[in-house]
Image (spheres, rainbow, N blue to C red):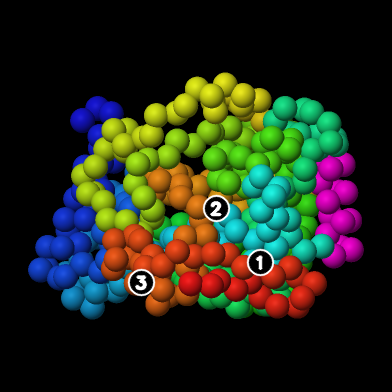
């Protein structure tokens, strides 16, 4: 197995098998496409370490703790995707995927800072009049569900890494909504993209991979453009074989959609600033980069199919990734002072 993907497929399959080797009935989340996709995008060293722990942990309590951690990871992933791609307060159905969040005077100042940093141009195509896009959705002081989901995800240090989890905890401050509200509405959580790229960014079709910094002494962020291919899998809650090869599952890309793309896959973007803290936040970009790949490997359905509450998400996984009813989103704009509702 000289190819890294072949090794990765073998590792993911072995991890799944070793989860079952105690004769334990697997939780539906463990068999889900979201968890499979997450394992597929993790650093291969993390996969080796996870497999080693599952094979060698002698203490029943420790193994049980590891199993519960895996199940928690698998369960939270679809809800993280929902949070990443969907605004809570307002969405304009007529805007062709353009997302609009509630505004505040402080937001406007930070948007001006982001535009100034990026020279008033799209960072990828260098076209004028770009949209200022959020890397991670801005928080509001009413995001109790979001707080719970993030709190659960940042406990999973085996997956994200202790250092990244700690930094994200500090930046998103899931237990302190005022702090989170400030952090996610700063220019470091914004990036300027053309209107065409913004639509792809909002839908999760376009991803930017943070690269290692260059040897330049000036503060600079390097990003690699990826147009993500989706698989034939219905959703992250669907059941999938963990020995599956994702290369055999990608949907054929229609040339009519590929040709108009204003920038090629693999293009390198460089963003400069006067100081490191003025650059787009690398950790938030990394968080988004991982989740978008999981979303694409899970078929990239409309993110609104994923419920935010634990019980409904569990029901969806038990039913093989399908909701029992057709969901219609009922938008309540922030001026009403009400939360978004879903009628089933």
Give residue 277's position: percent from left, percent from top.
76, 51
Q: Which mark is residue 287?
A: 2
- Crowding at label 3, few (<14), some or many (≥20) Cα neighbours within 10 Å? some
Give the number of the mark in front: 3 or 2: 3
Task: State the SS at label 3.
Answer: helix
Task: In this rendered view, identify the residue nearer to me: 114 or 335.
Answer: 335
Q: Going from the N terminus, do you reach mark 3 or mark 2 first?
A: 2
SS at badge 2: helix
Q: Secondary structure at mark 1?
A: loop
Which labelled disc corresponds to residue 331? 1
Asked whether, in this view, residue 121 is left or right of residue 339, the answer is right
Apparent side of residue 17 relative to residue 265 in the rendered image (left or right): left
Residue 134 in sight from this viewpoint? yes
Magenta span covers which residues?
Answer: 104-117
Magenta region's main secondary structure?
helix
Rendered location of residue 283, percent (x, y): 60, 52
Answer above or below: position of 4 versus 304.
Answer: above
Q: Which residue is mark 3?
A: 314
Residue shown at the point (62%, 68%) measured from the top left: 330
Residue at x 53% of width, y 33% of height: 227
Q: Name the mark on residue 15.
A: none
Mark 1 or mark 3, earlier in chain: 3
Does the image show residue 139?
A: no
Kindly indicate whether the residue at mark 2 contacts the one at mark 3 (C-beta within 8 angstroms).
no
């Amino acid at each position: 197995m000289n190819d890294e993907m072949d090794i990765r497929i073998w590792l993911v399959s072995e991890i799944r098998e070793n989860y079952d080797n105690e004769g334990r009935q697997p939780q539906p989340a463990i068999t889900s496409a979201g968890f499979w996709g997450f394992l597929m995008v993790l650093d291969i060293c993390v996969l080796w370490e996870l497999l080693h722990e599952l094979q060698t942990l002698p203490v029943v309590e420790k193994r049980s703790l590891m199993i519960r951690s895996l199940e928690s990871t698998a369960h939270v992933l679809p809800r993280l995707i929902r949070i990443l791609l969907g605004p809570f307060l307002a969405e304009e159905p007529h805007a062709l995927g353009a997302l609009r969040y509630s505004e505040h005077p402080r937001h406007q100042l930070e948007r001006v800072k982001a535009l100034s940093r990026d020279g008033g141009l799209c960072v990828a195509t260098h076209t004028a009049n770009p949209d200022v896009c959020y890397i991670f959705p801005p928080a509001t002081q009413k995001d109790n569900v979001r707080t719970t989901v993030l709190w659960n995800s940042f406990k999973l240090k085996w997956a994200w890494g202790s250092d990244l989890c700690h930094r994200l905890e500090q930046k998103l401050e899931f237990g302190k909504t005022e702090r989170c509200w400030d952090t996610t509405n700063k220019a470091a959580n914004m990036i300027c993209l053309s209107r065409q790229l913004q639509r792809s960014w909002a839908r999760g079709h376009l991803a930017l991979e943070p690269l290692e910094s260059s040897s330049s002494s000036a503060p600079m962020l390097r990003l690699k453009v990826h147009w993500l291919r989706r698989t034939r899998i219905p959703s992250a809650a669907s059941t999938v074989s963990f020995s599956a090869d994702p290369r055999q599952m990608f949907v054929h890309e229609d040339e009519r959609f590929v040709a108009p793309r204003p920038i090629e896959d693999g293009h390198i973007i460089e963003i400069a600033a006067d100081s490191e803290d003025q650059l787009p936040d690398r950790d938030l970009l990394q968080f988004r980069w991982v989740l978008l790949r999981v979303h694409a490997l899970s078929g990239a359905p409309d993110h609104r199919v994923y419920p935010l509450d634990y019980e409904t998400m569990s029901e969806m996984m038990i039913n093989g990734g399908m909701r029992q009813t057709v969901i219609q989103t009922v938008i309540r704009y922030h001026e009403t002072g009400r939360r978004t509702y879903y009628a089933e």
